[in-house]
């Protein structure tokens, strides 16, 4: 009976955990540089130069209209928060056109045509938010971090 109770406890603690976005990437891992194609008029983002600032990467598929609307909201808050859009698509021009059609000019949006950025940040499904603080990945979430200030 004790063995069964112990097994049940182990199963509850470890076996039934959901596959949360944090499960594969260790927290406080150094954030890799962004090596994609910048499709907006913003300056390129150099993670190494932003050690004192929080950066929020928003990985999204090109065909998610709700995700693009989230980026439009984030652009309005760019003075307070640094949000970077990372769009997975093999067609860089399509990402450029999509950003242009949503009037995203000053928010950094990268076309991740070869999925190198997604690979570097271990993003298998999007949309996904990755928070970087002091050059380290501190969290991953399906919803926007509170600090971003987006209405949910």
Image (tube, rainbow, N blue to C red):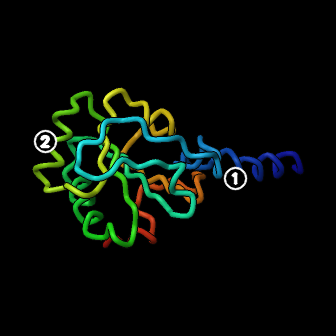
Mark closer to the observer (1, 2)? 2
| Neighbours of disc 2 within 10 Å: few (<14), some (14-19), many (20+) | few
Label 1 to label 2: alpha-carbon separation: 48 Å
- At a point 32% along the width and 46% down the height, the residue shown is 60
Q: Quadrant of residue 88?
A: top left
Q: In the figure, 88 relative to 11: above or below?
A: above
Q: Tell me, yes or no, if residue 97 can be seen here.
A: yes
Tell me where residue 119 appears, x and y as whole percent. Answer: 47, 33
Circle number at residue 81: none
Circle number at residue 12: 1
- At a point 18% along the width and 41% down the height, the residue shown is 96
Tell me where residue 148 appears, x and y as whole percent. Answer: 40, 68
- Between 31 and 6, the one nearer to me in the picture: 31
Residue at the extreme left of the image, as rendered: 101
Q: Secondary structure at mark 1?
A: helix
- Left or right relative to 29: residue 48: left
- Between 44 and 82, the one nearer to me in the picture: 44
Q: Quadrant of residue 124?
A: top left
- Left or right relative to 75: residue 82: right
Q: Tell me, yes or no, if residue 152 can be seen here.
A: no
Q: Which residue is mark 2?
A: 97
Q: Earlier in the sequence, mark 1 or mark 2?
A: 1
| Neighbours of disc 1 within 10 Å: few (<14), some (14-19), many (20+) | few
């Amino acid at each position: 009976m004790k063995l069964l109770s112990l097994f049940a406890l182990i199963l509850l603690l470890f076996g039934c955990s959901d596959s949360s976005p944090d499960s594969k990437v260790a927290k406080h891992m150094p954030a890799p540089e962004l090596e994609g194609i910048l499709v907006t008029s913003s300056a390129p983002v150099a993670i190494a130069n932003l050690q004192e600032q929080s950066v929020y990467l928003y990985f999204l598929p090109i065909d998610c209209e709700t995700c693009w609307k989230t980026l439009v909201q984030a652009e309005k808050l760019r003075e307070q928060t640094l949000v970077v859009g990372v769009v997975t698509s093999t067609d860089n021009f399509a990402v450029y056109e999509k950003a242009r059609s949503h009037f995203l000019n000053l928010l950094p949006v990268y076309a991740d045509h070869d999925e190198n950025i997604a690979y570097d940040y271990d993003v298998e499904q999007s949309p996904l938010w990755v928070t970087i603080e002091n050059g380290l990945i501190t969290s991953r979430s399906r919803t926007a971090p509170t600090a971003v200030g987006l209405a949910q």
